[in-house]
Amino acid sequence: MTTTQAGDGTRQTLIEADPDIPVVRMVREFDAPPELVYRAHADPELVRQWMGPRSIDMDIERWDVRTGGEYRYTALRDGEEVAHFYGSFHRVEENRKIVQTFGFEEMPEAVALETLELHDLGDGRTRLEILSVVESMEAQAGMMASGMEVGVDEGYAALDELLAALAGQE
Amino acid sequence: MTTTQAGDGTRQTLIEADPDIPVVRMVREFDAPPELVYRAHADPELVRQWMGPRSIDMDIERWDVRTGGEYRYTALRDGEEVAHFYGSFHRVEENRKIVQTFGFEEMPEAVALETLELHDLGDGRTRLEILSVVESMEAQAGMMASGMEVGVDEGYAALDELLAALAGQE
């Protein structure tokens, strides 16, 4: 089993490729209640502040988090467009679950089906679990080799900071 | 490898469960060019006439075949609602490819990612290939045990008739 552990030591993201089927699982805990973690995923103005590697800015054209909604954004590095991401929100259950597709224009044949679940750990803490399914073991290997753990890790570190700031405002 | 062959002998649908990963492949050929087969999938007024088992009527609330679009329909038997289906069109390439999700309200945790491809065989003929990906071998087994081959087979037999009628109109 291929396991990547990223993080600064205080908060780690477990990224695990299933050895048998083309599935990747990610688990990350946050010091914030599910409602706040959900809001940081659903509100495009908040998403823009944390998602992806630190070196990348997101220009969000569309972020319609509802069952049947869609999203589309451009990743920018120093103002230059580097990739165009898009997908659909298949099913959304507020504060609990988002099932979505994930694709990017630069590799139009690649698509992942992602299920994000928020589990209430009590004491204002949440465990985020993400299951990504792709169509072949080759696609799974490509996903694991893409360097995505940098974006995941840096993004969630920024999300920790954002959640702390949001909690302070409440 | 589990293989189901349905059909009346003239036109068969190959339905094949991958033995190693949670993927199901379907292949069916039609005596119509890709443009016509695509139109029969994209126009809700046509879809309504062929999709699903003969005993079922489809009440289509939404059928927005475009990248980022969504669909939703109710299956009716003798006027009674029996199931509610919905999903998103992740990516649409006219006359060539549709990538979509598939779900139904009666089993909200189940979701499939489906890629439909139309291959031009020449002489006004088309091969439709569908790849369905689910998250586990159990979900794949459930899909194969669902009796879906009846709907697939009866639906495509109705589509054969519709395509012949549409070709006659042109």
Image: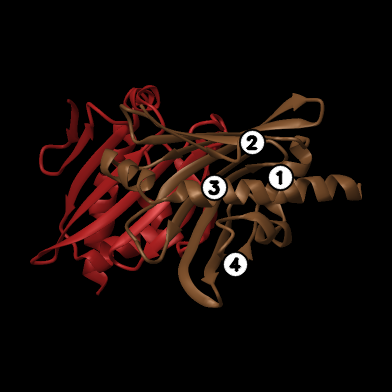
Chain colours: A red, B brown
- How far apart marks 2 and 1 lie (CA) works out to 9 Å
Name the subunit of mark 3. B
**Above or below — where is B104 with respect to B99?**
below
Earlier-in-chain disc, 3 versus 2: 2
Q: Crowding at label 2, few (<14), some or many (≥20) Cα neighbours within 10 Å?
A: some
Q: Which residue is mark 2?
A: B11
Which label is found at residue B160?
Answer: 1
Q: Quadrant of the N terminus of chain B?
A: top left
Q: Which residue is mark 4?
A: B57
Total marks placed = 4
Q: Position of residue A72 (x, y in %)?
A: 54, 49
- Secondary structure under tag 1 reads helix
Residue at (53% x, 67% y) in the render: B75
Disc 1 marks a residue whose amino acid type is Asp
Horizontal arrangement in the rendering, residue A8 relative to residue A77 (left or right): left
- How far apart marks 1 and 3 lie (CA) works out to 12 Å
Disc 4 marks a residue whose amino acid type is Asp
Earlier-in-chain disc, 4 versus 2: 2
Residue at (59% x, 66% y) in the render: B58
Name the subunit of mark 2. B
Residue A39 appearing in the image: yes
Name the subunit of mark 4. B
- Secondary structure under tag 4 reads strand
Earlier-in-chain disc, 4 versus 3: 4
Asked whether disc 2 touches disc 1, contact meaning CB atoms under 8 Å apart, the reply is yes
Residue at (72% x, 42% y) in the render: B37
